[in-house]
Amino acid sequence: MTETADVVIIGSGIVGSSVAYHLAQQGCTNVLVVEREAHQGKDSTGKSMGGVRAQFTTPVNIKMSLYSINFFAEFDEVVGHPADYRAHGYLFCATTERHLNYLKTNRELQLSLGLKNVELVEPEDILKMVPQLSADDIIGGTFCPTDGFVDPHSVMMGFMLKARETGTRLWLDTTVTGIEVVNDRVSAVETTRGKISTPVVVNAAGAWAAQIARMAGAELPVEPLRRQLVPTEPFDGLPKRFPMVIDMSTGFHFRREGKGILLAWNDPEETPGFKTGFDPTFIEKILTRAAMRVPCLAEAEVNPRRSWAGLYEMTPDHHAIIGPAPNIKGLYFVNGFSGHGVMHSPASGRITADLIVKGDSELVDTTQIGVERFAEGRLLHETAVL
Ligand SMILES: Cc1cc2nc3c(=O)[nH]c(=O)nc-3n(C[C@H](O)[C@H](O)[C@H](O)COP(=O)(O)OP(=O)(O)OC[C@H]3O[C@@H](n4cnc5c(N)ncnc54)[C@H](O)[C@@H]3O)c2cc1C
């Protein structure tokens, strides 16, 4: 017998789980989430650095962050599961007038959209937060104390557990192999566990989203891009608590992770592809940048076996694609987060559920984030991508 569902969500990472949660909140509970892995969170969600920030440069990203960060702040109470939201802040450090002016312009926009607590900071303020920085060339920066970190795995589990309480089903170990479209309308999803008859399909397949779209005959400009993180062994040369620090001269950034420090850097030589193995030569590259900005990190020990790699899901304008597929009724995209899928998971789940249930969302101008923008040349421009 063919299974039926009102909505099938493909992918149970933090984004698919948030869509399931927000649909359930809006009374849509005959929902089936299909996940090819035996456990949730094995792909990008489980590899994330967990950073959340509202310091962006476009209204849509700032609005999505404002909704999401407020949501994380109340997550434990509302969802009944810990998000482990730590409001330790994000500190952007500028070494050139161009970068400082860029931060000032962004701050004006952020203030105008309701982010009230983003502050301009002087080099002395920066050194108070992290005295170990080499700051001779730092001329200023911005700090937002409600930016910070969450536990992506716990957020994902919270969303899904809450959705399941009201009837949402989760099929693990089940791969989607096809999407049936009849008269330009979605009619079923084919899986390794059989066919599911459904009028609505949500593509929440992360870095694999373009493959899923193609199953329905749709094009989606989402490309996988490897991203590598290096944790140090326990290190007490930096404060116990400090913000995510971003060195704008190199893009190197770091934060505390337990007793150690988590080091991140976007390697401009990285090329698109499904590469998930960690490249040990990355360690020297990142440690060079680390030691330049934080000399004491030259003494930190790192173990290549504890370092890891995962995939960003990149779009041409570094903004998510959220909304219906233009030519296939019933197919929805919630993809292409370009490195911000954890922090924007509450907003993206809410917007997708709004679009499915009500046809629009008051959270953002949804015409801006639909996939049509690429064909119509209406690309958004986000430059604060870490
Ligand atoms: C190293 C690293 C650091 C990051 N740091 C941050 C950060 O600090 N802050 C932030 O906001 N974001 C960060 N990100 C990005 C963030 O992790 C992603 O944007 C987010 O996890 C995307 O969630 P998702 O649910 O869309 O994707 P995923 O977690 O990848 O989930 C997609 C799911 O779809 C499933 N799937 C795919 N194909 C099929 C199929 N055919 N059938 C069934 N299931 C399928 C997969 O198994 C997977 O579970 C980081 C990413 C990486 C790799």
Image: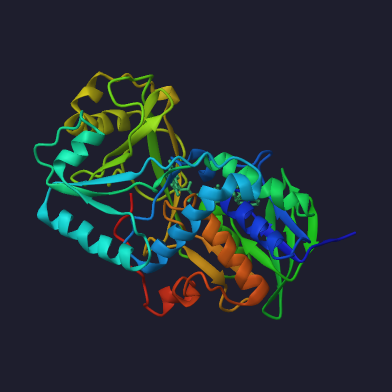
Q: Could you tell whether 110 is left or right of 83 in the image?
A: left
Q: Could you tell whether 38 is left or right of 360 in the image?
A: right
Q: Residue furthest right?
A: 1
Which of the 4 quarters of the picture holds residue 182? bottom right
Q: Could you tell whether 157 is left or right of 286 in the image?
A: right
Which of the 4 quarters of the picture holds residue 261? top left
Q: Compared with residue 183, is residue 248 higher up or lower down, i.e. above or below? A: above
Q: Where in the figure is residue 121, as x and y percent of width and height? A: 20, 48
- The residue under the point 46% across, 46% down is 311
Q: Nearer the viewer, residue 269 or 150?
A: 150
Q: Compared with residue 7, is residue 18 higher up or lower down, i.e. above or below? A: above
Colour setup of the view: rainbow
| Residue 269 makes an appearance in the image | no
Which of the 4 quarters of the picture holds residue 62? bottom left
Q: Compared with residue 289, is residue 215 higher up or lower down, i.e. above or below? A: below
| Residue 143 makes an appearance in the image | yes
- The residue under the point 45% across, 40% down is 86
- The residue under the point 18% across, 45% down is 249
Total numbered labels: 0
- The residue under the point 38% across, 24% down is 260
Q: Where in the figure is residue 51, as x and y percent of width and height? A: 42, 44
Q: Nearer the viewer, residue 319 or 275?
A: 319
Q: Nearer the viewer, residue 291 or 327?
A: 291
Q: Where in the figure is residue 365, as x and y percent of width and height? A: 47, 75
Q: Quadrant of the N terminus?
A: bottom right
Q: Where in the figure is residue 242, as x and y percent of width and height? A: 33, 34
Q: Compared with residue 371, is residue 191 higher up or lower down, i.e. above or below? A: above
